[in-house]
Image (cartoon, grey):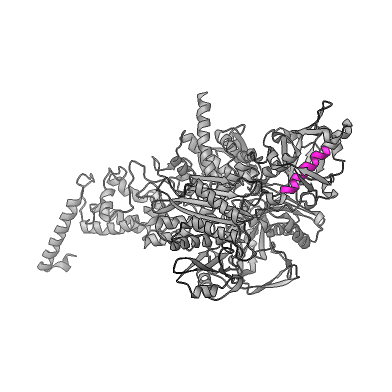
Amino acid sequence: MTHQKTPMNRRSFLKSSTLAGGGLMISFTWLSAFKYDDKLNESDLPQWNELNGYIKITSDNLIKIINPNPEFGQNVMTSFPMIVAEELDVDWEKIVVEMGPHDSVKLGPQFTGGSNSVRMYWKPLRQAGATARRMLMQAAAQTWSVPVEEVTTEAGMLYHKKSGKSGTYGQFASTASGIPVPKEIKLKDPKEFKIVRNSKKNVEGAKIVSGQPLFGLDYKHEGMLIAMIEHPPAFGMKLKSFDASQSLKMPGIKNVFRLELYPEGFEQGGFDTRTFNDLLVVLGNTTWEVMQARKKLVVTWEPKGDTVDTMGSRNGKKAVNVPGRLESTSAQLSEMKQYADKPAQQLRKDGDPETAFKNAAQIIERTYNAPFLAHNCLEPMNFFAHVTEEKALLVGPLQAPGWTEPTLSKILNLPAEKIEIQMTRMGGGFGRRAYGHYLVEAALISRQAKAPVKLVYSREDDMTYGIYRPMYTATYRAALDADKNLLALHIRGGGIPENAIHPNRFPAGAIDNYLAEGWQIPSNITIGAFRAPRSNFNAAAEQSFLDELAEAMGKDPIELRLELLKRAKENPVGKNNEYDADRYAGVLKLVKEKSGWNSPTDKKYKRGVAAYFCHNSYVAHVADMVERDGQPYVERVFSAVDCGIVVNPDAATNMVQGAVIDGIGNALYGELTHKEGAAVQKNFSQYRIIRFHEAPKKIEVHFVQNDIDPTGLGEPPFPPVFGAVANALYKSTGKRFYDQPFITKLNELSKS
Amino acid sequence: MAKRYYWPKKAIFLITTLLIFMVIVMSAFDREVPYTKDDQTHDSIASVTAFTQVYKVLMSPRCMNCHPSGDVPLQGDDSHLHTMLPRRGKDGKGLYAMKCTNCHQPENTPGVRTPPGNANWHLPPADMKMVFQGKTAHELARQLVDPKRNGRKNMAQLIAHADDDLVLAGWNPGEGRTLPPISHAEFKKAWLTWIRNGAFAPAP
Amino acid sequence: MISLNINNKTYSLEADADTPLLWVLRDIVGLVGTKYGCGVAQCGACVVHLNGEAVRSCVTKVSRAIGQKVVTIEGLSEKNDHPLQKAWLELDVAQCGYCQAGQIMAAAVLLKENKQPTDADIDIAMAGNICRCGTYLRIREAIHLAADIQQKSKKR
């Protein structure tokens, strides 16, 4: 048992008056249940007794758990209630789950991203469950006039064994809701877990397989109009003039107007990234009508020239210059090459790398490149907004309501309490939906149109109007002595418009002479978080380089990594090493064992290994590649994951498998290029997403068993896939591939 | 024509060459081809010349992409394997959830690289694959007149095939796709010239 | 006025004959289980059954559906108990879930035409449906399981 202070204040435990999304929703419900679908109708009854922001119980013992965090497939709608239910001690199959609205007072940070959901909420949710249970016990003790210590619970029931008294949580919920929140609470020992660590099915599964409304695009509101945006055809362009006369004659079209997103000098937060500021809005009755009317617009665009963004920071406002040039991929690559040869900003230095390189018997130098990537969430960006002078209602897919609300408040000039944000299930996120500019767009359109509006991006809008994974490059240099010992490592990384270098991560700490440098080239192409930002490139470059290094040193690639980790553990270089060498080595050892690394049974597979640490978790993969018709396919993968306690093992396995497939797809095929500032790939006919037959047939996921509080999982399995694929591809083709996507170079080679 | 080759030496040389050429061509020709001889005069040179034009068209992506050597259609101006790897199926109309007309509509879908359309979109059936991909002009010419390999078409049907709806679709390929190297009218003329002059195959 | 038979119900509605069936279903009829993913028949999120074939409703003009039988995910089974739906739940296939209606509708045609599909058959049938979350492994497993469920229910 662990004693915990309960940091929630009284306010977050107050009974709520209204919680629902508001408006008239057509068959759109925020409630879900794994079983007992019939209970969902009963839940319309308003007799909920709120024990805290996460738990409500009716007198007839219907138990509702509120999920605070936006759901984008990481399965928090299920795993969060599991954590609450564990400490509350209720029958999992009898609860209903409701997606909570944005309410940071009651429901915390509500941020889906950075593999943070379970990490952030692990303790608050357990405390919510445990304190509510305690309050129910106290209510029963008061009613039965027995000491609270003698009251026990089991699966939503309260017992006093001595007197033989018993009752449901529901019977005591009303009384319990008036009892002060305990100042301290005992949480369960992980060994006592009955729900957590036992796989539970997705509470929204039944809705998903039957096509019920769940997603932002599914949301409907009475009188709702559809809005689409015409954006400049290229980064660096802006709207000059337009003629909408033909569009306005099209059936179902209500209006066409110009929209300025942020006013001049608007102080942007880190997640206020927006791609274009000056937009053209087409408003109509249905999506198809609006799509057709867009084709009739006559628009003139012009170069925007250099501009200045105003960024807010802890130290006040900062001006960021945004170049106006129209960029093309070929020019970007050659510019990156020029930068790569110059000394850059030093990010970390250990020992004397310069001397080590001077004295080296052998220097291995390799440069790695990776393109921009589009998130390509299968549900394109969209949001519903109904904004009046008094208040705003916004409904849709969003990862970070807490970051978008202050922006909305400033731009709409409405106090935060007048802005209601309800998060729908998201058709994918991958970081893209942490940037709430499309809510601001929807809100401003609604305000100007004086109507409820759903803003919809087409696939082409979504892909060409992105907040992409940046374009990265890195040069890795290793100095070896005559006996093939590693003397020094030098990493110089850059990118457009940021570099990816994590200077304090492995192999930093394991090498005496170490230098990490970084540079960047400013750009008007908008970038943002993409599943494991920066790590998703580093793991490709670093893990591929380590493989090549191992070969040059005559070592097994896993053994080399383990040796370096042993050094980092026993005699670390430098003080600021972000990783735990034991846990890192742990996943490598586990994957080595599970994949039969030392004695592979099937020789048809060409194997590649990689491991990486990010979001406080450790993952190693062995990718087994085959060749069919001259094309490489990863057919089998072994994964070892250390993310501490795994709340919902089957769903966690699913997520790791998905990350592996996503990684293979992006390593082999993913690429967004630009020509004269315009994204070349506009739809899936040009942007290659991994398909069914290209995915592995088997992905075996093994979790390290420990009682460490949960760490990240959505992102950590993704980066090392790139390295494992690169290393398997080397074994399969005999050639090293340094530039992503690998398939491009491979096909060039096979043609020549 | 005759006037230009009045001089005996040249005429003899030319006739000899022509005869040799014809012998080669005829010897390579499948004699079982039941084309109707009627009163046509056969000009093998004109026929073979016309076929050069026909061949260019048939080997262009617009025709060849649906006459692949494997069971997956080709796609794009570079004739890569159709992404999503749809299969021919027994009747040439695809398999399971991947039937041609699930995506290929009766008409072209607007936009760049969207599915081109035709109500009868299909590949040749599995028992008569009518492969163009990888075929030499000689092989293709022979194949086209062989009812065992041309979809059981006699000469009249072969002639009519130039105006087949799906053949015509090649000249209406949708945005962003190159047209066959010559117009449909030119193609049809070459096609008819080739057939009416005996449907000779170029030398192997 | 257009009359459509969707999930065995008749709907009379106003729509331009060129409107894709997808948008008629979603914006006019109000059946939103059929998803928009790409609009150009690349991703498969919009698959519905038109006379039993897995057409992509984003490129299928509504005029093609007039007088024909349209089935959407909402009408695949009466009690959401199609073997595929059962298998999808049993194996908890979905992550974000957005593509799954299209996946199930595509798989339904496969299972109808091939009672015991092999891995190779599944590859052929499903290569047209993108899952951005990467649930392909479970989709494969679920199709095999659904085939077994289908087989068993027949024997009974």
Nearest the eye: B183 or A54? A54
Place of residue A682 in the rendered image (x, y in percent of width and height, measured from the top left):
54, 59
Does residue A251 appear in the picture of this structure?
yes
Instruction: Locate the C terminus of chain B by quadrant.
Output: bottom left
Q: Nearer the viewer, residue A35 or A135?
A: A135
A129 in the magenta segment? yes
- Residue A576 at x, y percent in the picture: 65, 64
Answer with left or right where residue A741 lies relative to residue B89. Answer: right
Residue A669 seen = no
Residue A53: % across, % down:
79, 45
Question: Residue at horizontal 81%, vertical 54%?
Answer: A418
Question: Outermost residue, top direction?
Answer: C156
Q: Which residue is depicted at the point 56% across and 54% down? A: A585
Q: Give the main secondary structure of the magenta stretch.
A: helix
Determine whether A132 is above or below A415 in the image: above
Residue A103, image x, y percentages: 78, 51
Q: Nearer the viewer, residue B192 or C102?
A: C102
Please tell me whether residue A304 belongs to the stretch shown in magenta: no
Q: Magenta part of the protein: which range?
A: A122-136
State which quarter of the image contains the N terminus of chain B. Answer: bottom left
Q: Name the residue at the front extreme.
A: A570
- Above or below residue A666? Residue C85 is above
Q: Horizontal placement of A208 versus B112: left or right? A: right
Question: Splitting the image into 4 quarters, where does residue A567 fall?
Answer: bottom right
User: Does residue A647 sit above or below A746 in this rendering?
Assistant: above
* Number of disc labels: 0
